[in-house]
Amino acid sequence: LMFIKSKEAELESNLAAIRQAISLYKRDCRNVIVRQLQKGYSGLHKVPDSDLCPKSLMALTRPDLPPLNGQHIIPDPDGGPGITVSFYPKPYLNAIPVDPFVGAAVWTVYYASGTNTAIFEGGAVTGGDPVDHVGVFDISCVDNTGNRRRGFVQAIDGTYYTDW
């Protein structure tokens, strides 16, 4: 029982770290938009939330890798030609934390565009990112497909890890 409780505490901490990194990325991106467009916060309502999100989980650790190549470009919210906001994010995590029940950084990825989810594993999205995805909005634990979780699907409190 203590083993499971310690793994659950580690899982909660790792989920919180990733979610905080996503939140900080969005905050910094939002602040860059406000500074570069010089319209204050009133111009933010025209920027889709999905444009503020990191393009991939790896962008939280290595923003110099594709698709960012060190730069997160947001189109001009007024639809103007050629005006873009350039955000050069910093690394928000040293590495993507692991799911302690799986023993690896394997997560279900949710996109702000509301498209299908994807599975992040081994530093990349398995099978490639969905074609129409825009921005990582949230993550959760993978389901029990292929016994990845080795039977650990339900927490001590009765909730499912995939709902955390």
Image (tube, rainbow, N blue to C red):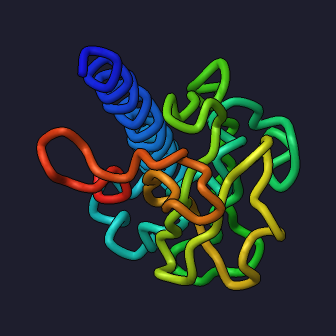
User: Closer to the camera, 5 or 19?
Assistant: 5
Q: What residue is shown at x 84% (from left), y 35% (from top)?
A: 64
Instruction: Say if 73 sits above or below 118 in the image.
Output: above
Number of numbered discs:
0
Q: Specify whether 84 is left or right of 12.
A: right
User: Closer to the camera, 121 or 155?
Assistant: 155
| Res. 58 image quadrant | top right
Instruction: Say if 130 sits above or below 54 in the image.
Output: below
Q: Specify whether 47 is left or right of 81.
A: left
Q: List x then y, in percent, for residue 146.
A: 65, 62
Instruction: Say if 43 sits above or below 70 in the image.
Output: below
Q: What residue is shown at x 64% (from left), y 70% (from top)?
A: 75
Q: List x then y, in percent, for residue 164.
A: 29, 50
Q: What residue is shown at x 49% (from left), y 51% (from top)?
A: 33
Instruction: Say if 55 sits above or below 9 in the image.
Output: below
Q: List x then y, in percent, for residue 153.
A: 38, 52
